Amino acid sequence: MSQRWEDTDLPIYFVHNFTDVREAVEVRLNGNLIENNTIPSSTSEYEAGQNLILNDTETREVHLIVNGFN
């Protein structure tokens, strides 16, 4: 963890596209599989590893929540 991280820092919502065709895209945290489509509507409920994988041909995006708490 960065020395610049502070307890008051908020989670970060990343959105990345990908172009290679993937059979599956998985998010794991500490070796545990995090189910797809787990990002809540309220930002106050964001936790590390929550994600939304859009693996359809038209979209191909990874949405991922990261933070310094867990």
Image (cartoon, helix red, strand yellow):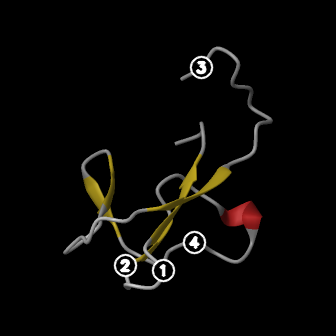
Report the mark closest to the observer, 1 or 3. 1
Q: Nearer the viewer, residue 18 or 53?
A: 18
First in residue order: circle 3 vs circle 4? 3
Q: CA distance from mark 2 to mark 4?
A: 16 Å
Query: Of circles 3 and 2, which is in front?
Result: 2
Q: Secondary structure at mark 2?
A: loop
Q: CA distance from mark 1 to mark 2?
A: 7 Å
Horizontal side, residue 3 vs residue 29: left or right? right
Identify the disc placed on residue 55: 2
Q: Report the mark closest to the observer, 1 or 2.
A: 1
Which residue is under mark 1? 59
Q: Earlier in the sequence, mark 4 or mark 1?
A: 4
Residue pushed farthest right? 8
- As measured in the structure, the alpha-carbon distance from the residue carrying label 3 to the one carrying label 2 is 31 Å
Residue drawn 70% across and 77% down?
A: 41
Which amino acid does the dot numbered 3 rest on?
Ser
Q: Position of residue 55 (x, y in %)?
A: 37, 78
Say which of marks 4 and 1 sits in front. Answer: 1
Q: CA distance from mark 4 to mark 1?
A: 17 Å
Q: Are marks 1 and 2 in contact (CB under 8 Å)?
A: yes
Write down the residue under mark 3.
2
Q: Residue furthest left?
A: 23
Task: Name the residue: 76% across, 37% down.
Answer: 9
Q: Find residue 51 and report its horizontal and vertical position in percent.
A: 48, 66
Say what amino acid the circle numbered 2 marks. Answer: Asn
Pointer 3 local density, CA inside 10 Å: few below 14, some 14–19, many at least 20: few
Q: Which residue is mark 4?
A: 39
On screen, residue 6 above or below 45: above
Question: Quick check: marks 2 and 4 in contact, CB under 8 Å?
Answer: no
